[in-house]
Image: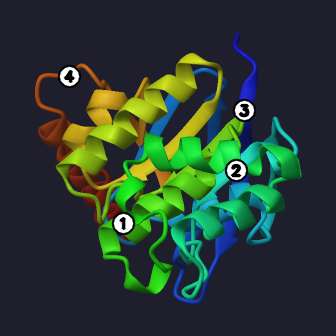
Amino acid sequence: MREQAIRAEGLVRTYPGGVGVHGIDLEVAFGEVHALVGLNGAGKTTLMRLLLGMLRADSGTVAVGARWSGVGHTVDEPFGYPDLTTLANLAVAARLRGVPKGKVGEVSAAAIADLGLEAYATRRARTLSQGNLQRLNLAAALQHHPRVLVLDEPTSALDPRGVILLRTELRRRAAHGAGVLVSSHHLDEVARIADRITVINHGAVIGLLDPGGTDIERDFFALVLADDESRTGQME
């Protein structure tokens, strides 16, 4: 069994009205990309916040196989100070993650190249498009070479070139031993990068998808529909 980057057991966090996360078990191994998919409101972001300690669980346990300096994430508000340049923002993010002062310039310059931000290095963050802000956010999460990555909808504002750059980076990081958990609505994209795909619905894990499946979208909706029908039947 591979060493676990993230292990969650019996995670519960309930909000008024019954929404939230209800008894989720999840494992992400070092050296793999594990995708989390579900409809809007399924509980993906809540789960990621619980895994990162941004929310306190009502019950259940979480273990992360790295110190906080070895974790990268894009959950909640995008990182970036509006009046700082792209390069300055990355320098701040690097220092916050414990990158030695003498290495910050090298690390940030590499991140700018990896995410295709060369033309925007000296631009203030408030002048960037949503897509380039997303790239800045991803660069800040990736630049310190974290052993554990938790990325919530990382391609949501990216253009096709940005999607390809990120895809390449995530596969490269996993190949070098990082554990990557990524959520997405784009089933065709996660199928290209994921080693495992977990489907959640109404805050619970309802099944797995085969990244190599011939019709992953059909398989996804079949799982969700079956779960919805089962819940409706239980209420009658």
Depicted 123 relative to depicted 160: above or below: below
2 or 3: mark nearer the eye: 2
Q: Give me the residue at 47% from left, 63% from top.
A: 121
Counting residues from the start of the chain, the first of labels 2 and 1 encountered is: 2
Q: Would you name the residue on which mark 3 appears? A: 5
Tell me the kind of residue under disc 3.
Ala
CA gap between label 4 and label 1 equals 32 Å
Tell me the kind of residue under disc 4.
Gly
Tell me the kind of residue under disc 1.
Asn
Q: Would you name the residue on which mark 4 appears? A: 213
Q: Would you name the residue on which mark 2 appears? A: 105
Name the foreground residue: 191 vs 224.
191
Tell me the kind of residue under disc 2.
Gly
- Camera sees residue 24: no
Label 3 with label 4: CB-CB less than 8 Å = no
* Element at label 2: helix
Q: Give me the residue at 65% from left, 65% from top.
A: 49
CA gap between label 2 and label 4 equals 43 Å
- Camera sees residue 57: yes
- On the rendered structure, is 177 left or right of 70? left
Residue 149 image point, x, y percent: 62, 44
Counting residues from the start of the chain, the first of labels 3 and 1 encountered is: 3
Depicted 54 relative to depicted 197: above or below: below
Counting residues from the start of the chain, the first of labels 2 and 3 encountered is: 3
Counting residues from the start of the chain, the first of labels 3 and 4 encountered is: 3
Disc on res. 58: none
Q: Quadrant of the C terminus?
A: bottom left
Q: Quadrant of the N terminus?
A: top right
Label 4 with label 1: CB-CB less than 8 Å = no
